[in-house]
Amino acid sequence: MDSALFVDEIAAPGQTSVCIEGIERPVHVVVKAHVFTLTLRLVVRPDVPVRSFKGHKLSAVLVYDTDPIRPVDYLKDEPLQYTVKTSGNGCTCVVEAKLGVRCSSPDLGSLHCH
């Protein structure tokens, strides 16, 4: 393993589970226009050049869970607003995000943040 990105914590209003292709998967429920957070941790070997989140730009995009994955269309405001705060040592960061998406009901079941 050269490096790995772990999600240490997801702070969202709720959690449920769904069964997809016979596999039970957790789903974190977020509410439009309310902040939710992800705490990410970077684990690397000493000889790997990227050892910290510092100096690196993290980006996120809201996409449909389709094959191929495609971004959620928008006219004016991006559907996912977020800020990234890096810890002092750079090994963890907290992503504070908020959804502001308008889409049709059939599309709502296939939205994912990547």
Image: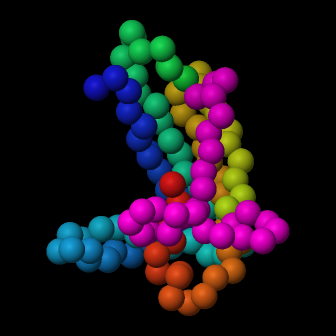
Q: Quadrant of the N terminus?
A: top left
Image location (x, y in percent) of residue 99: 66, 68
Q: Is 40 colored magenta in this rendering?
A: no
Give the residue at x 30% y 68%.
25
Residue at the extreme top = 47
Image location (x, y in percent) of residue 87: 62, 30
Rendered view: 16 above or below 86: below
Rendered view: 98 above or below 41: below
Give the residue at x 57% y 71%.
30
Residue at the extreme bottom = 105
Image location (x, y in percent) of residue 96: 66, 53
User: Total marks drawn?
Assistant: 0
Image location (x, y in percent) of residue 20: 26, 74
Coloration mode: rainbow
Residue at the extreme front = 68
Q: Is 57 colored magenta in this rendering?
A: yes
Q: Is residue 111 left or right of residue 66?
A: right
- Front-most of residues 91 and 66: 66
Q: Is residue 14 left or right of residue 36?
A: left
Give the residue at x 41% y 41%.
6
Give the residue at x 69% y 67%.
79
- Front-most of residues 10 and 99: 99
Q: Is residue 93 visible?
A: yes
Instruction: Give the magenta part as a residue range.
Output: 53-79
